[in-house]
Image: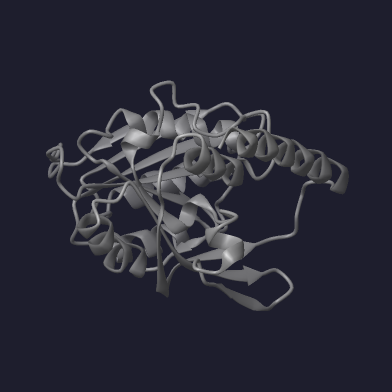
Amino acid sequence: KKMRKETFNSGTAGEANIQVVLSTHNSEKYLSRCFDSVEKSLRGHKWIFTLGDDGSSDNTLRIASEYSRRSSADYWNIKKFPKAKNVAQAKNRVLRMAKDYGKRYPIICFMDSDDEMLAERISFLLPEYRARESKFIVGDYIIEHYKGYTEYINVNEVNVRDHLRFGIWATLFDESIIPENSQFFDENLEVYSDFLKWWKLRHEDDMSFDFLSGRPVHVFHRRKDSISGETLKENLNKIKEEKDRIYKLV
């Protein structure tokens, strides 16, 4: 479902036009908080919202539709898909949608529906992203653990910067990084496909990342892991094997 607003402007390639990209699944409990945080961060900028729904059976789509009518975005593009086989496939489908608008809104700002964007995602990262003519910039973030404690992640720590252990929601990146077939994440992985993607971009594609520490740009709400220990171990082994293969090539 596409919702064109009267003020829609397609934008011009090269401008700081931002595309917020979101894959949702049964997110009715968190969605308004997510949308409020995006609106607070993006108001006053040229931006659109691209939302791919991953087979929700709750009120996710109704909430998105209602919110779009009072949003400051130029345009909302909403599409419902059947349930994906995993998170990687769900994210690839919405990135395929984003690719259609990439030349006009080239700065990709990915969100998770149960998280919160902080205003610094734009006010802090965007000026540096543009000044450095960056393709990919990463900022600090906060993890709110389901056990009740908070963790601050500094992206200049070795574990994050060198091992590339950060989520897509802490970044801004250029749409040109998304391949034409939109197979951005490895759909053979049930978890941590983002970690492997960053490894491939860095070591196979020789792409540099900019890390900007000093202010948090995102709040990640970590919930109880729904993936079994056996599945997690199997996927971690797959990632290690791929990293070892790539490392031998560099």
The percent position of residue 46, horizontal first and vertical second, equals 19, 51
Is there any visible trace of residue 243 in the rendered image? yes
Residue at the spot 34% in from the left edge and 69% down from the top edge: 120
Of the 4 image quadrants, the one containing the C terminus is: top right
Q: Is residue 119 visible?
A: no
Q: Nearer the viewer, residue 88 or 242?
A: 242
Identify the image quadrant of residue 240: top right
For residue 222, which quarter of the picture? bottom right
In the rendered view of the protein, which quadrant contains the N terminus?
A: top left
Left or right for 239, reference 32: right
Q: How is the image coloured?
A: one colour
Q: Farthest top residue? A: 181
Q: Position of residue 123 (x, y in %)?
A: 27, 67
Q: Looking at the image, which residue is at 28% across and 36% down?
A: 3
Image height of 143 relative to 241, above or below:
below
Query: What x and y, as percent, mark residue 231?
Result: 82, 40
In the image, 143: left or right of 108? right
Q: Position of residue 220 (x, y in %)?
A: 56, 63
Q: Quadrant of residue 176?
A: top left
Tag count: 0
Give left or right: position of 215 versus 102.
Answer: right
Q: Nearer the viewer, residue 114 or 149?
A: 149
Q: Nearer the viewer, residue 28 or 137?
A: 137
Residue at 48% over, 54% down: 169
Camera-side residue: 167 or 54?
A: 167
